[in-house]
Amino acid sequence: MVADRDHRNKPRLAVIGTGIAGLSAAYLLKDKYRVTVFESQARAGMGAHSVDYVSNGITRRIDIPLRIFCHGYYDNLLALYQHIGVEILTSDHAGVFSDEAGRIILHYGNSDWGPGRFPRPKGRSWTSPVAWTIGLQSRRFFARARRDIARTDLAQLSFGEYLDQSGAGRLFVDHVLLPMMSVTCTCDYQAVRDYPADLMLEYLTCGVHEIGIMSAAKGVDDIVPRMLTDVELRTNSPVASIEPAKAQLRLVTGAGEDQCFDQVVVAAQAHQAAAMLSGFDDRRALLNRIPFEKSTMSVHTDPDILPAPADGLSPVSYHVPQGSSRAEVSVNLTKAIPRLSGQETVFQTWNPMRRIAPNRELARVDFTRPTVTRDSRKAVLALREQQTRAGNRLWLCGSYMAEKIPLLEAAVDSSVTVARQLGATIPWSGSITAAD
Ligand SMILES: Cc1cc2nc3c(=O)[nH]c(=O)nc-3n(C[C@H](O)[C@H](O)[C@H](O)COP(=O)(O)OP(=O)(O)OC[C@H]3O[C@@H](n4cnc5c(N)ncnc54)[C@H](O)[C@@H]3O)c2cc1C
């Protein structure tokens, strides 16, 4: 009873959005506040698009998208997952790159060797001059990037300007690097080139290619409930507006219900957050300076989308037609995720350009995702500065709010920052990198 009364006496806090930013904010703030979480979709956002896949008499749940991460870049995410007990496994993400005619340009696998892994050519790439040239250009690029990361002028350069200045080899840049970063950032090559150079180099030199990729062993359904304990979750509850109401903030949902909260954490994407704000003109203007791109993900069992012969290919297949604005990238989920073994092969294809047999498609989902430019970064700094002002009650978090590529890590980093500003103790404090 006492615990119940204590809980009711806590200040009320709303979290809007249940991507990883909203989930981690709710988790970190639940001890200090009475937390209500609003999500516009029918299920918590991180798992909103998961599908059941039945094959060979086995049913497995597939996350859309598969979310991968690595040591060296994901300090907060890894600390959070470790803290809440999420089991993690390594996942093979070696790749094969093909052109518009389906001809393989480069095919590599990963070999474990000493402290890390190193890519080695596979199949015909052993004897292909193009593949060896790309390998050489890649080595030169990474060696230079590791030196250049210390440069103080990188933040003033776009990644495209950096690539042009550094004389990086065209074969490697056009056929490998831009396709890889277009799927990592789920955007056009031009948007990759527009990223600030320091953000791109920080990611590319973190060791992602040497240390290996990881994923949550049991998927999103194992993660979400761990972060929603002791909070009230309201799904199918899109927030239509947030406005000041004396010493509180009033939230109005799409169904016209309104409630007042002492603090509100908006963990939706920047353009979604801007659409909710009423009476916060300066923040809306700043949020509208953050660009975003749309893309599509298909989960299917159509092997015809891979270069032939499909057997023996590395798990990630990049289709890179000349003149296209982004790559089409398929992951063989059965190879990348051990828990899917025993079933018919299933793929996720980002940006499907070619036809996927409709009877082989399990799901097709449209996503939006922020990108970063030198201008959007200034807008984010101004938004972060506003959150340090005395009496602030409106908090923005999400992958766009950190000084990083908008990946899972940036989202958790932003929640850690907001939770600290709201007086929460970060359980893994000491190992975090978030800047307050
Ligand atoms: C195809 C794809 C693949 C990706 N793969 C990876 C990967 O492998 N590794 C990685 O690190 N990152 C990956 N990312 C990026 C990662 O998904 C994002 O960084 C992460 O989802 C950002 O989390 P977030 O909480 O900031 O935003 P979101 O995940 O976008 O969550 C925002 C939430 O707010 C909800 N919402 C919006 N408006 C309202 C409203 N009005 N009322 C209530 N709720 C609302 C939304 O429904 C959503 O649930 C990928 C992204 C995409 C698109």
Image: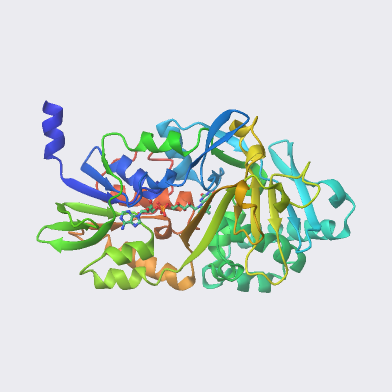
Which one is nearer the viewer's eye here, 205 or 130? 130
Q: Is residue 314 left or right of residue 264?
A: right
> In the rendered image of this protein, does residue 144 appear above or below residue 221?
below
The residue lying at 67 percent from left, 73 percent from top is 164
The residue lying at 13 percent from left, 33 percent from top is 6
Q: Is residue 410 visible?
A: yes
* Residue at the right extreme, as displayed: 127
* Residue at the top extreme, as displayed: 1
> In the rendered image of this protein, does residue 232 appear above or below residue 244?
above
Q: Which percent across, then down, holds residue 208?
A: 62, 48
Point out the image quarter for the N terminus: top left
Tell me where residue 287 sits by quadrant.
Answer: bottom left
The number of numbered badges drawn on the structure is: 0
Q: Is residue 207 visible?
A: no
Q: Which percent across, then down, holds residue 82?
A: 45, 33
Tell me where residue 109 sits by quadrant.
Answer: top right
The residue lying at 42 percent from left, 60 percent from top is 400
Q: How is the image coloured?
A: rainbow
